[in-house]
């Protein structure tokens, strides 16, 4: 697999746009395993933080759909650890936002079929600004995947292991 071209300035610009009242929706796709590399941890964290801050500030006036992998197509221990940690953080963030009564980003885990080594859509961040997507074609690809039955499964708070030493295996007791 060749490394995709990652234009950091576009990602930062579009993530910053989430603060604008003119932006009402966003689709964020991060399915390439490159996101799990240590060198991209800072950018990945920036994106996670931008989504959380926008959801906290803008509440129900902003809809964010994120697409990430359901499981890794690679067998690398560092990548698996990074993947599990990232999914745990996204799930915890969604739980915290929901507990505060706010709209949380909808996280869709893309299921790669059989022998498919990579996602059928490119990584992207597209925003709906004044009713117009930054790139209609790209946003359409992501939305088609999200709305295809069986293509994704949601990442929710139920995916977190909240069963501590005095806990219960049912996470609803914490809510």
Image (tube, rainbow, N blue to C red):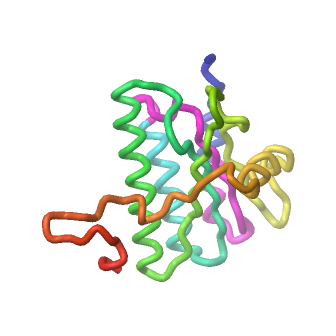
Q: Is residue 94 located in the magenta-colored stretch of the structure? A: no
The residue lying toward the viewer, choosing from 136 and 169, is 169
Q: Which residues are magenta?
A: 13-40
Tell me the residue at 52%/49% (across/down).
47
Which residue is at 63% across, 62% downward?
64
Residues 166 and 141: in front is: 166
Quadrant showing the C terminus:
bottom left
For residue 119, side relative to residue 160 (left or right): right
Farthest residue, direction left: 165
Magenta residue check for 22 = yes
Please state which of residues 160 and 54 is positioned toward the viewer in this rendering.
160
Image quarter in which the N terminus is found: top right
In this orientation, does residue 110 appear? Answer: yes
Image quadrant in which you'd find residue 80: top left
Q: Residue furthest top?
A: 2
List x then y, in percent, for residue 72: 50, 34
**In the image, is residue 137 above or below residue 97?**
above
Residue 105 drawn at (x, y percent): 56, 64
Identity of the residue drawn at 53% across and 73% down = 57
Report x, y in % for residue 110. 61, 46
Number of numbered discs: 0
Q: Is residue 73 above or below residue 139?
A: above
Indicate the position of residue 111 as horizontal and vertical percent values.
Answer: 61, 43
Left or right, 74 with respect to 150, comes to left
* Outermost residue toward the front in this view: 114
Residue depicted at x 33% and y 72%: 170
Q: Is residue 15 visible?
A: no
């Amino acid at each position: 697999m060749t490394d995709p071209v990652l234009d950091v300035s576009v990602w930062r610009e579009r993530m910053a746009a989430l603060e604008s009242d003119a932006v009402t929706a966003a689709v964020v796709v991060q399915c390439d395993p490159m996101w799990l590399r240590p060198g991209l941890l800072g950018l990945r964290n920036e994106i996670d933080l931008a989504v959380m801050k926008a959801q906290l500030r803008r509440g129900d006036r902003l809809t964010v759909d994120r697409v990430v992998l359901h499981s890794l197509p690679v067998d690398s221990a560092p990548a698996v650890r990074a993947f599990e940690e990232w999914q745990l953080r996204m799930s915890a963030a969604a739980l915290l936002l929901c507990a505060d009564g706010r709209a949380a980003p909808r996280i869709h885990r893309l299921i790669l079929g059989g022998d498919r080594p990579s996602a059928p859509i490119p990584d992207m961040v597209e925003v709906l600004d004044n009713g117009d997507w930054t790139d209609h074609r790209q946003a359409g690809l992501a939305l088609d995947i999200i709305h295809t039955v069986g293509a994704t499964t949601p990442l929710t708070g139920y995916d977190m292991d909240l069963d501590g030493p005095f806990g219960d295996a049912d996470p609803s007791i914490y809510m």
